[in-house]
Image: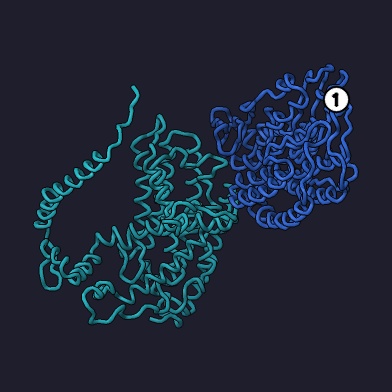
Chain colours: A cyan, B blue
Amino acid sequence: MATVPEEFRFGNFLASIIWVILIVIVVLTLVILPLTFIVLFYLPLPPVNGEVLTPYLFLTMIVDPTRTLPIVKYLIHTTPFKVIVFPGFVFAAIIAAATIFVERKFLAKMQLRVGPLYAGVWGVGEGILQLAADGLKVISKEILIPSGADKPIFWAAPIAFVATAAAVVALIPVAPGWVVSNTNVGLIAVFAILGFFPLIALLFSWASNSKYPFIGGLRALHQMIAFEIPFILSALSVVILAGSLNLTHIATSQHPFWFILVLPISAFVFFISSLAELERVPFDLPEAESEIVAGWLTETSGMIYGLIQLGSYLKVYALAALFVILFLGGWSGPQIFPHQLGPPDAIPLVKVLTLQGFYNHVTVNAIFWFLVKTIGIIMLMLLPRGISPRIRIDILLHTGWYKLIVLAFVNMFVALALIYAGILGPGGSLSIH
Amino acid sequence: MADLEDRISESQKMGMQILKESDDDRLMTLSVGPQHPGSGHFRFIVKLDGDYIVHCDPDPGYVHRGEEKMTEYRNFIQNIPHLERPVIHDSTNITYSYSLAVEELTGIEVPRRGQFIRAIASELNRQVYTLYWLAIYGIFLGHSTMFMWPTGDRELFIDLLEALTGARVTHAFNIPGGVRNDVPNGFKDRCLRQITYYEKRLKEYEDIFYNNPLVRQRTEGVGILTKEDAIRLGVTGSVLRASGVPYDIRKAEPYDVYNEIDFKVQYMKTADSFARAYVPFLDMRESCHILRQLLDKMPEAGEVRAKLQANPRGPPGEAYRRVESGRGALGYYIISDGTPKPYRVKISVGSFRNMLALPHLLVGAKMGDMPVIYWALNYWPVEADR
């Protein structure tokens, strides 16, 4: 039986809209608001500015906007905010999304193309909404699972991939005090988490029950293990000089001289190894299209593919940020932001707009310089895609096991010599503490 | 011979060793194609031992169109548009040798200006085909810029050919007796400007691709096809020239005006995938010189097409003529029984002959070398199936 669409009537259309509005109002007032207040009533809310934060205090924000400032100030220092929004997931995901757009445009300019062009806002910002369009497409796609696939692992692996990438992001400090988890073994934790990725790739490729993903998974395993060791060794020379594994401390300890000045070879090895870790050109063997279709991603479809892409771009941000912290002095840079954005005794609306009360010029400056350096490193990571072909697996393994390890050791001896000569490092003549 | 043995890379030697030792029960069979991004309309079944290919079985025929049979039901002129379908990116060359063979059968003499225009169209089309081939070679190596640049520059030659013939890819330009129409006004200047720009671009291609250390690492010493093997397997065109045999149909049996043109046959002696990838590039560069000479020597005015009878036919007999296409010797063997339709047409294409070297080269290579070796053979699956 053929389905015929109903005849369109404007009256029916209006009526349906009114119904929707009515239902929303009824549900909101009768269900959601009471539920919210019941939940808030039982939550132990903290005192802000001398008064206890009650649900009714939220309503007063509508009348006096300046009252929101202490609440916001309180909220942005809570752990959930840090995990979800600022140095955590949403911040990293926005950078990842921007990276995808910039990569496509940057590559297009290099290759004499235009890149994404049409999905823009009213003709401005050519192609800036392309990622939103792609995301909607990926979400609406059907997820196909190959017959004979190991379903629990097949579903779990992409989620684990994003979660693991986000876990690396959680250890990255973006400004003094602005880090989700400030542990004293930060660098070791980063490497421990990065060690999960080959496992996820191999599990996913094995679970897809297909030949090309299997080859790709094995390639990913070989590649990541071969580059893990020079990766860790190159970071080790930084640890020797900084005398700490805490990432915040490593960033602040290179105050007069960035470590890239004394450890250029380590920085080079770290950069090459992180390209291999990220499976980016020229080390994209696990996804080599002309050889093994799409490598370990061959059987991915729909949002499974989307999640793995999101995870891999989160990794791009995490490793670029790690490079900045280890070698480029973290957030250090000249102070360019003013102490206060507006006059101190302004009307309430201006006070809100100029973020008075929780605007901190040091933090904003730190975040600014950190972002500038990180974006620069990300651009450097995107560059090889335009100029380089894929390398072969035996050359890759040879590079990892023979050349990079030796190079990493060379600079480690330089670092040790600097320590023993008392030039750099804790208590060195050139370090300022 | 001894130095060729030395040039076989370490990995290839290990592959040979593994080949001797491998059992059947540890092999993995992969069907590469016809839906593999690195295969084209073609399939080859490879058996892998680890990462080494120990067995390769090409399986063409996915785009067989029965071109040879179709020619028997159409007259000599009607055959032109469908004969260029097997390789639309080189459509002038595939109809060139057909026209030459029909002219030999029917005894038509092509006017001199027509011969020059044919050669110009043929050289322009060689550029179009080789750029397309190079673009795919770039993306097979994972070099996306090398995919975009030739694809963009190919467009300029397509514009020239569109001005000349009226169609972008399927030109149906060569017909028995000459070419369909004369060159448009200002074509010579436009063509020369284009070539000047293009030669600059070729230098950039060399910088970003052929002189790239990673490209060299991947292609040099991979898939060595010795001179003896090349002759024994009957490969042709750039593959044969890359193995150190300076053989070009344009030089060996010059057709139309090619004996008046001064050019060198480009060949290399290294016989590896790099040579097979580089010789077409050298051919493009040499083709620019040929184009300049052709444009220079072309008569200013004259007929471009001989007057034909309504349904051209010749006495019963047979003819075989071949030209140098983008993929090597492209010959037509036509038997006529005196009617306007051919009795039998056999197309001998370079692609099929180059494909025969594929199992010989892939065995012992790594899986990662597969696209490097495969596409360097200058193989066009649609043309091989005809």
Quadrant showing the C terminus of chain B: top right
Task: Count the marks.
Answer: 1
Whole-percent x, y for residue B25 in the image? 54, 28
Answer with the quarter of the image where residue B272 lies: top right
Q: Residues within 10 Å of mark 1 (few under 14, many from 20)?
A: some
Residue visible at 63% across and 53% down in the picture:
B214
Amino acid type assigned to the residue bearing label 1 in the image = Ala
- Residue A136 visible in the shown view: yes
Answer with the quarter of the image where residue B208 lies: bottom right
Answer with the quarter of the image where residue B83 lies: top right
Residue behind mark 1: B319
- Residue B275 visible in the shown view: no
Whole-percent x, y for residue B10 in the image? 66, 46
Q: Chain of mark 1?
A: B
The front one of B197 and B39 is B197
The front one of B49 and B44 is B44
